[in-house]
Image: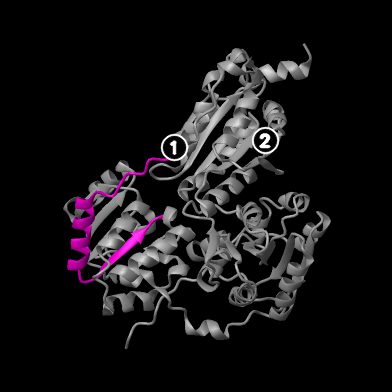
Amino acid sequence: MSVEANAMKSLRGADIVARSLERLGVTRIFTLSGNHIMPIFDALLETGIEIVHVRQEAAAVHMADAWGRLTGEVGVAMVTGGQGHSNAAAALFTAQAAESPLLLLSGHAPLRELGRGAFQEMAQADIARPMTKASWTSASLDALGDDLALAMKLAREGRPGPVHVSLPSDLLEEEAAIGDLRLPDPGAARPAPAPADPHLVDSVALRLTQAERPLILCGPAMCGERGRIAMEALEQASGVPVIGMESPRGVNDPGLGALGEVLGEADLILLLGKPLDFTLKFGAAPTVAADCGFVAVDPDPSLLLRAAREKGDRLLASGVADPFAFIAALTERLAASNDASRWRETVAAALSYAPPDWDDVRGSPGRLHPVELCREVSAFLSRHAGGTLICDGGEIGQWPQALVPAKRRLVNGVSGTIGASIPFAIAAKTLSPDAPVVAVLGDGTFGFHMAEFDTAVRYGLPFIAVVGNDARWNAEHQIQLRNYGPERARHCDLLPSRYDQVAVALGGFGALATTPAELSEALEEAHRSGRPACINVMIDGAPAPAIRRPKAA
C-alpha cells in the first residue's frame, strides 16, 4: 500500500490536533518551531489555519493574549517543550492578570520516556499551573481532541484566562485508524456563562438606586471594545458612573484622571467582575470611606469569598454571575432610573480632569516631554480612523493612557509587566490590516522583543512603534529618586541607542525625532511606508503622571 493510501486510512495525533483546532474555530496560531511540535507544523498544512512564526516563545503568548483581548475568542500559542515551554510560560502571567482567554500548547517529551532522562524532559504542567486556570499533559491519543475542546472552554468560561496543555511527541506521531477516532464537537468548546439571577439583579438595582453616591467598577475582562460599549450603556441607562479598571496603577491610573478623589466619597461600590485587590488598595480607608458598602458580582466564587473576608458586614450582597450577562440584565432593570445627578457629573469631571499646565509643557532642547509625544500620537490617530493604541512601559506607558483617546487599545495590564507591546502590535495588525496600529513604549521595553520586527516584516504587518527614549529604566530610576535620593540613583542607565536603525536593519522603517514637528512627519512617513516602523523619540525622563486636582481655597 502506498504512503498516500495509508494516510487516507489513518491519522497521526498531530493531524487530530490540527483538525480539532480548525473544527473548534481556530483561524490563526502564534508559534515558534521546535523538535517536539514539528508533526503539528506538518499537519497544519492540511488545514486553513494560518500561523505567525515568531522569534521568541514569550512573544507568541503575548500575541495570543492580544488576540484574546481584542476578539474575545481564544488566542492560541504553540511552542516546543523544555525551555521553549518555560520561555513561553513567563508571558502567561500577563495574560492571567488581564483575564485574557488563551490556550498555550506545548510540545512535550515522549510519555514512554518520562523518568528515563528524556530529551528536554520537564514538569511542564507544574510550571504553567500557577499562571493558568488549568494545566495538564495529554495522556492518550484518544483524548487529544477532547483535551483541546475542554481547554478552549475553560479559557472563556467564568473569569477568562490562560489554559495550558502539553502534547507528548509520541502521541503526536502515533497513528490510529480514522474510523476509530472522533474529532470534538464545536459545541464542546463553548463556555456556559453563569446566568444573571433575577433576584440578585433586583437586589443590586435596589441598592444602587438607594445610594446617594454609588460607583460601578468593572474588571479587565470588561475593558475591551465590547465591554466598554456595555459599560457605557449601563451608565446611560442607570445614571450610575461605570468605570473599567485594567491598570496596575489602580486608583492612580492616569487614564482615570482624579478617580482617587471620588472613590473616597462613594457610599456604595459594586464590584462587577472586579477583584478587590491592590488596585483598590483592598478597599481600605482612606482610599474608600470606612462606612462605604460593597456589592460583589463575579464569575469566580473564590473572589466573592475574598471580598467577604476583607469587608465583613460591609459586603451587603454578592453572587456568582457572568459580568456580561449581569451588566445586560442590570441595564434593562435600571433603564427607567436614569437622571442627570450631580454625583454623576462630579465623577465625570474627576475622570476627565487633566492638569491645565499640560497645555504648555515643553521638553528640553533636543528632547520632547511625554505630553508632546502623546499630543502628536493623538493627532495622528485622529487623522486615521479605526486605529489601535498600545501602551507599554513603566513611566512612558502611563502618559498615552491619559492623553491619547482610542476606542481600541491594549495596555500591559494589571500584572504590571512590561515588554509585550511589539507582539501586541503584530497581533492587533492581523486583525486590523487597513487601520494603523501605534504602540507607545519605552526604550527599556523595546529591548524585550525587538527581534519581532523580523516577524512583522516577514508577514507584512506594518505597525508603528513610538519609542520614548530617555536612556534609562525610568520607572526604577524614579523609585530610586523617591526612596533613596539622587545621590544613590545608580545602575538604571541605558545608552541613547538608535532603535530606529535596528528596525531598518531588520527590513522596517526607522526615523529619529527630537522635536514635535519631526515626530508628526515621521508618523505620516511611517504610515505611508507600508513597513513595520520604529520612531525613536528622544524624551525627557519624566515620572508618570499622578493626577491630583488642586484643593479649593
Q: x, y (%) of residue 333?
A: 25, 61
Q: Which residues are magenta?
A: 190-219
Mark 1 in CB contact with mark 2 (< 8 angstroms): no
Residue at position x 72%, y 34% in the image: 45
The answer to whether residue 479 is magenta is no
For the residue labelled by badge 1, is the local secondary structure a helix, a strand or a loop? helix
Mark nearest the camera among 1 and 2 is 2
Q: Is residue 277 visible?
A: no
Side of 244 relative to 291 (left or right):
right
| x, y percent for residue 465 | 68, 62
Q: Amino acid at mark 2?
A: Thr
**Residue underneath mark 2:** 47
How would you rate the neighbour count of disc 2 (Cα within 10 Å): few for under 14, some for 14-19, many for 20 or more?
some
Residue 108 lies, in percent from the top left, at 61, 25
User: Residue visible at 32% across and 49% down?
Assistant: 298
SS under mark 2: loop
Disc on res. 432:
none
Task: Give the label on residue 154, or none.
Answer: 1
Mark 1 vs mark 2, CA separation in Å? 24 Å
